[in-house]
Structures are given as structure tokens and as C-alpha cells.
Amino acid sequence: MADADNRLKVRLVTPDRILVDGEAFAVELPSRSGCLEVLYGHAPLLAELGVGWVKLRGLSGQDSQEYLVAWGFVEVLPDRVTILTPTVDKPGETDHAEAESRLESGRKLWNEAGEDPAKYEEANAIIHEAEVKLEAAGRGA
């Protein structure tokens, strides 16, 4: 439950760990259909995440925190946000070599897709994820 300051209860969870379990004033998310900002009192929502930055504003006394997510789901209720994602990179954790390898495999898949639109879509998703991770590694997140 949120406190008197209208803060959201926020949980950021992967299959093997809970990265965030706290309260924030706002949460910015990369959904598959565009960026979302969630504030206290938001209408209930279930959305698929894309690749990008989750930004937590005013998390437990800090100005903000950022986490790079790659896919997953978010459940929004008026007083809480639960983010479920298979992978999260904290600032400074992004593996440049791994992202380069994923970019190369995505490009290879794209070149071999032929007439199959599903393979192009998969290749584009891999390429996009790798490019976002490379950008994160380059900026020193």
C-alpha cells in the first residue's frame, strides 16, 4: 500500500532475484507499444515490455534509478507496479562483448530470413535489443 505521499510500491523481479522492492513517486517503462509513465492512482494495466530503460523516480529517498530491461511484463495497479523481466542490467553491468555477439547473430538471422516475415521480426527484435545494450554500455549507464 502506498503511503500518505502517494508513492507507488514498486517491485522489479527476474527469475532469480528481486532487484527492487521499494516505493517511488513515478515509474517510466518501455512497453512494446511505447513508453509509459505510471503515477499513483494509475488505472490498472497489464502490458508487455520492450527493450529499454525502467526509470524509478524518487525511489526510497533517492532521486532516481535506472535499469535496462529486455522484454517481460508489467502489472500496474493504482498503488503498485510489478515488473517481471527475464533480464535486467543495472547501470554499469551491460556486457559489451555479449551485446556485440547478439547484434552479429541478429544480423545473420536477418540475412538468412528469406521470405519468412516471422524470422525478420525475430531478427529485428534481437538487433534492437543488442543496439540498446550497446548504447547502454557506451554511455557507461
Image (cartoon, grey):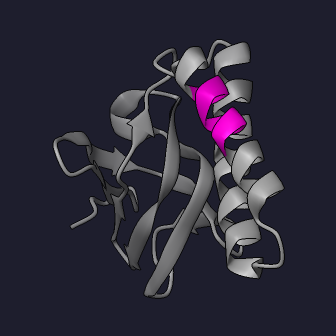
Q: Which residues are the magenta region?
A: 99-105
Residue drawn at point x = 56 percent, y = 43 percent: 55
- Determine which quarter of the picture holds residue 107: top right
- Determine which quarter of the picture holds residue 33: bottom right
In this rendered view, identify the residue nearer to me: 95 or 84: 95
Residue drawn at point x = 32 percent, y = 55 percent: 10
Q: Is residue 103 magenta?
A: yes
Residue drawn at point x = 61 percent, y = 52 percent: 51
Q: Residue 76, image x and y in percent? A: 41, 75
In this view, 94 is above or below 52: above
Is residue 56 visible from the viewing direction of this image?
A: no
Q: Residue 113, image x and y in percent? A: 76, 65
Residue drawn at point x = 53 percent, y = 54 percent: 26
* Prevalent SS, magenta region: helix
Q: Residue 82, image x and y in percent? A: 32, 64
Q: Is residue 25 magenta?
A: no
Q: Pick the quarter of the image with the C terminus.
A: top right
